[in-house]
């Protein structure tokens, strides 16, 4: 009886921290499997960015490595004041805005169609998603040679079939170079916008829509007053994510026009400065500005995603 009592007292006097690991130790044990991935990510992404940031402060031409010198913010000033670089910034803005807006509008229309039940909807959805799954270079080559080619392209083949031998055979890339790039990017990014908006449509409150229809609301009124306000966050998310990727687009510009005919955007200008002019400092400064712009857009995108998660949790 006495031994049992003493044993109980001994266990009672043992502090709880000795019987179970501390919260800090559990936290490290949980995060330990992620450390190799974190170290790999820092080595692959952050260290090269730090090196690029350092190089951007130097006047550094790869052809004359011994003549490099520290110039401070001179490279950034040249990026922001040089006429060709300013034009590439404007081309980047115009290309991104056009592709994002057109992809959102077309993607919204396709999402509204796929939200309805019909036979073969799964097959149609798979076919519509297919352009987004293509490698960007392959998609650009498809548009350049299969569709735009003035001799055997599909567009001129349709014009010849409709108008006969007298139909004009325009050179689509030479006549409308920027539009040619925009069309290929719209074709590739519309499925991405469609998937985001389709997810938003399928998360609507069906009871609220049915109540509105019972009160006599038309399809347009339901879309304007219920569907569109509900899709606002999804439209913002699609626009922000699309902008992050399209503002960095290089494949379509390089493949279709090689940056000529006024289509050189900022990523292609960075490529020209680095690999053709060998101006490492100037190219690094332009690249840092692209990264800063992408981070700003990504910050807004993360806020939109967080607000969507909060709405879904509160709804659940």
Image: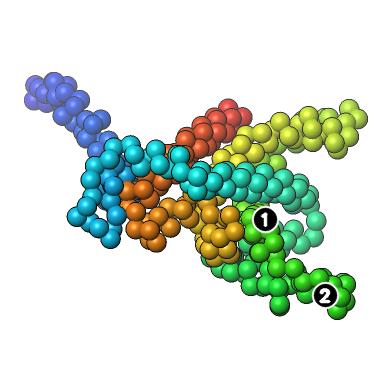
**Residue 300 pos. (x, y %):** 51, 33
Name which quarter of the figure residue 263 lies in. bottom right
Tag 2 or tag 1, which sits nearer the N-term? 2
For the residue carrying disc 1, how many other residues have a C-alpha within 10 Å: few (<14), some (14-19), or many (20+)? Answer: some
Counting from the top left corner in percent of width and height, residue 50 is at 29, 44
Instruction: State the CA–CA distance, disc 1 to disc 2.
Output: 22 Å
Label 1: element kind:
helix
Image location (x, y in percent) of residue 126: 66, 61
- Which type of secondary structure does the marked residue at label 2 adopt? helix
Drawn side of residue 225 relative to residue 237, left or right: right
Above/below status of 124 relative to 281: below
Asked which quadrant contains residue 160, the reply is: bottom right
Q: Position of residue 135 (x, y in %)?
A: 53, 64
Instruction: Read off the residue under disc 2.
Output: 160
| Relative to 271, residue 292 above or below | above
248 and 64: which is toward the camera:
64
In the picture, which quadrant includes the C terminus? top right
Provide the residue designation for mark 1.
179
Figure disc tally: 2
Is 176 positioned to the left or the right of 248 in the image? right
Q: Does residue 223 appear to the left or right of 291 in the view shown?
A: right
Q: Does residue 116 sit above or below 64 in this rendering?
A: above
Front-most of residues 148 and 120: 148
What residue is rendered at 48% in x and 55% in y? 268
Residue count near mark 2 (Cα–Cα under 10 Å), binned few <14, some 14–19, many ≥20? some
Q: Residue at x 50, y 45 (%)?
A: 83
Q: Could you tell me which residue is drawn at 84 percent across and 32 percent down? A: 221
Q: Are marks 1 and 2 in contact (CB under 8 Å)?
A: no
On screen, 101 above or below 128? above
What colour scheme has been applied to the protein in the rendered image? Answer: rainbow
**In the image: residue 271, left or right of residue 177:** left
């Amino acid at each position: 009886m006495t031994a049992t009592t003493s044993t109980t007292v001994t266990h009672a006097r043992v502090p709880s921290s000795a019987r179970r690991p501390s919260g800090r130790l559990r936290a490290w044990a949980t995060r330990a499997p992620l450390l190799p991935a974190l170290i790999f990510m820092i080595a692959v992404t952050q260290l090269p960015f730090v090196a690029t940031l350092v190089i951007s402060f130097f006047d550094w031409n790869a052809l004359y490595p011994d003549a490099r010198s520290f110039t401070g913010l001179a490279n950034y000033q040249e990026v922001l004041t040089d006429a060709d670089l300013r034009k590439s910034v404007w081309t980047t803005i115009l290309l991104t805005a056009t592709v994002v807006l057109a992809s959102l509008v077309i993607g919204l229309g396709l999402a509204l169609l796929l939200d309805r039940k019909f036979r073969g909807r799964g097959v149609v959805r798979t076919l519509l998603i297919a352009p987004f799954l293509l490698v960007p270079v392959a998609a650009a080559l498809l548009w350049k040679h299969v569709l735009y080619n003035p001799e055997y392209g599909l567009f001129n083949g349709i014009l010849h079939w409709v108008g006969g031998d007298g139909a004009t055979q325009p050179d689509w890339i030479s006549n409308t170079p920027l539009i040619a790039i925009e069309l290929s990017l719209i074709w590739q990014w519309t499925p991405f916008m469609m998937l985001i908006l389709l997810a938003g449509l399928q998360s609507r409150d069906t009871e609220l829509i049915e109540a509105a229809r019972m009160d006599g609301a038309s399809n347009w009124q339901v879309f304007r007053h219920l569907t569109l306000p509900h899709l606002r966050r999804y439209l913002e998310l699609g626009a922000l994510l699309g902008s992050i990727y399209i503002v960095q687009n290089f494949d379509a510009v390089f493949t279709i026009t090689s940056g000529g005919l006024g289509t050189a955007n900022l990523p292609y200008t960075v490529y020209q400065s680095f690999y053709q002019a060998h101006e490492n400092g100037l190219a690094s400064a332009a690249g840092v500005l692209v990264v800063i712009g992408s981070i700003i857009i990504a910050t807004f995108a993360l806020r939109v995603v967080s607000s969507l998660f909060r709405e879904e949790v509160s709804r659940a």
